[in-house]
Image: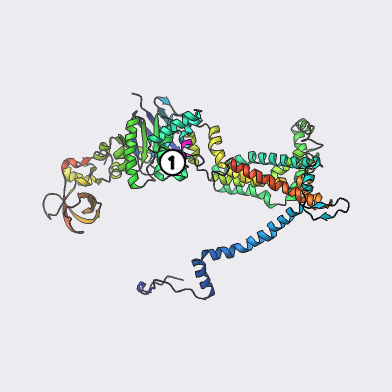
Amino acid sequence: MSFDATMPRATAPAILPGSGGMRGALSDLFWRRPKVLLLLTLLPPVLWLGIVYIGSLFALLAQSFFSIDEFSGLINRQFTLRTYGDLLQAANLDIILRTVTMAALVTLASAVVAFPIAYYAARYARGRWKALFYLGVMLPLWSSYLVKIYAWKLILAKEGILTWLLAKLHLLWLLDAWLSLPVVGGNSLSVSFTGTFIVFVYVWLPFMILPVQAALERVPGNLVEASSDLGASPGQTFRNVLFPLALPGIVAGSIFTFSLTLGDYIIPQIIGTSRLFIGQAVYSQQGTAGNVPLAAAFTVVPIVIMGFYLWGAKRMGAFDAL
Amino acid sequence: MTPAVSFQKVSRHFGSIRAVDAVDLDIVPGEFFAMLGPSGSGKTTCLRLIAGFEQPTAGSIAIFGERAEGVPPYRRNVNTVFQDYALFPHLNVLDNVAYGLMVKRVGKAERHKAAEEALSLVRLPGYGARRPGQLSGGQRQRVALARALVNQPKVLLLDEPLGALDLKLRENMQEELKSLQKALGITFVFVTHDQGEALSMADRVAVFNDGRIMQIGTPEDIYQRPSTRFVADFVGSSNVLPPDFVQRHAGQRRWASLRPEAIRVGRAANGEGVAARLVSSNYLGATTRLALDADGLKLHAVVPAGAALPAEGEAVLLTFNREHLHLMDEAV
């Protein structure tokens, strides 16, 4: 509507009439009762989450209290803790321990690699550099996960570019020495735990960088100055100010890296040894083996571990600065 | 005597911007020194140069006789009260105050005792367990002060510390800061854009403009005898009189300043004085501030409340004592 200069201001009403019709009445209703609007917008996603997502999760959890009849392969729908007992068999405990160790190492490495990048982006990058940062961090997320993993398979393979590069640098002996180590070594990086670890860190890194960057962004620059002013060396400032204030971001990021590693079954399948991770165990138990109760019990493990992890993080005061 | 802080031809340039430009400055130990100026005049950069957050592009800085260029902030026995306090949000008040002692590896019991004492000093005893977020602006200000003072700095730097407080609180804090400074005997260097604050608190004031010091002196010097038009105008809004006007009334062709309270406003249409017209009047409580137009020259006068006022637009006659007309050094 254009401003009508010829209209005398005095005739303008103090209260404007309603716009009329269904939409006008609805707008007025929502303004008077904001909770109605909230309810209407929240209901569909809550129903979706509640029934389809949480519901199926509980259905899965319920399965873990059933057992399998070893002769017929049929599921015996009676409450039992026997399946959880099976989890404690040495072979299964091995899988759990291997997965948790890998998840912890991947999380730690992600945090160490992510922090300087996030710090640079939060403190120094401006304008074009900031855009470049977001692009650089997000770009790998846009391409297919499988493509990236197979690309890494080629990079890490015995005939791959990494071996070629190390040969050119006359550092092949270093690779060979590493590969000859027990547990982390193997025939080549692409069939070793080291390879699995490298690819996990690569794939989950953006999920660590972004929350850490967001946390650091919220730390006012003058807190760093204040710390230095009060006599803290840069190392002390990092330990006493930056790290505690970035901790909620690191914990948020580690929830991603830790739980994604706990549940993933594709990366260790393509890059790594033949020894299983939890995700692979779930996949094979409910697929080829047809032991859905044991698969369900395996899925409970990451949930319980994450529960303890978050509880511990809270106790450590990771969320105090929020 | 060794100056507490000494600047010799200190410059700090940011690219082509001369934030601080060839500044010479000596701050006497134990004095309350104010750096006054509009925003962007270089006063805060000077403070940051003393704290060590900035390094000079040229010139040399000494703190109690020791060269300070290239020395990081954490190795200077100088502490800062930041404009927005910069309290650590993840630490409680006691740990905030004890922070400086903690990083110097003072034992827990000892540093908490010292922090409690510092909190008592700023009249916040027993607030140690609270979080900075639970305090009011005035209380945060006191915590920031305690956190700096607990380190017993050689120089305390205050960057517009009262800027975020409301008027009543600000006046209380001014008095408190001043008596605290007297009691402790620490050199205070105080940055402000509020001339009233600078005049009422400081022993000496440096007036900054465009990265340079325009004048250094006692509040009285600055207020009564401004050396340049800028100082006269900025400090308490003196009337700045052009050379032609001054020649007519004082016989010399110089810029001069005249305090608004030195002008008497009479109603006589004729007689000795400056003919003017009242443009508007602002009631300020204890006084009334009059805007006057003397043949194109805009003047301000302050008269006590209760005096009979001419109506707006009325012709008035302005008189003043010759000795109140202060001739400035600035070249014509």
**Residue visible at 68% across and 50% down in the picture:** A141
Question: Residue furthest toward the bottom?
Answer: A21
| Depth order, front residue of B95/B330 | B95
Q: Is residue B197 left or right of residue B260?
A: right
Rendered position, A37 above or below A123: below
- Please determine whether, in this image, residue B50 is positioned above or below residue B167: above
Depth check, front residue: B248 or A307: A307
Left or right: A180, with B76 as reference point:
right
Residue A31 place in picture, x, y as percent: 49, 66
| Residue A220 image point, x, y percent | 50, 43
Q: Amino acid at mark 1?
A: Tyr
Chain to which mark 1 belongs = B
Which of the pair B136/B238 is nearer the observer?
A: B136
Residue in view at x 79 percent, y 47 percent: A82
Q: Residue furthest right?
A: A71
Question: Residue A273 at x, y = what percent?
Answer: 80, 41
The color scheme shown is: rainbow
Task: Reply yes or no: does residue A266 show up in magenta.
Answer: no
Range of magenta residues: B89-95
Q: From where the camera sits, is residue B153 visible?
A: yes
Residue that label 1 marks: B85
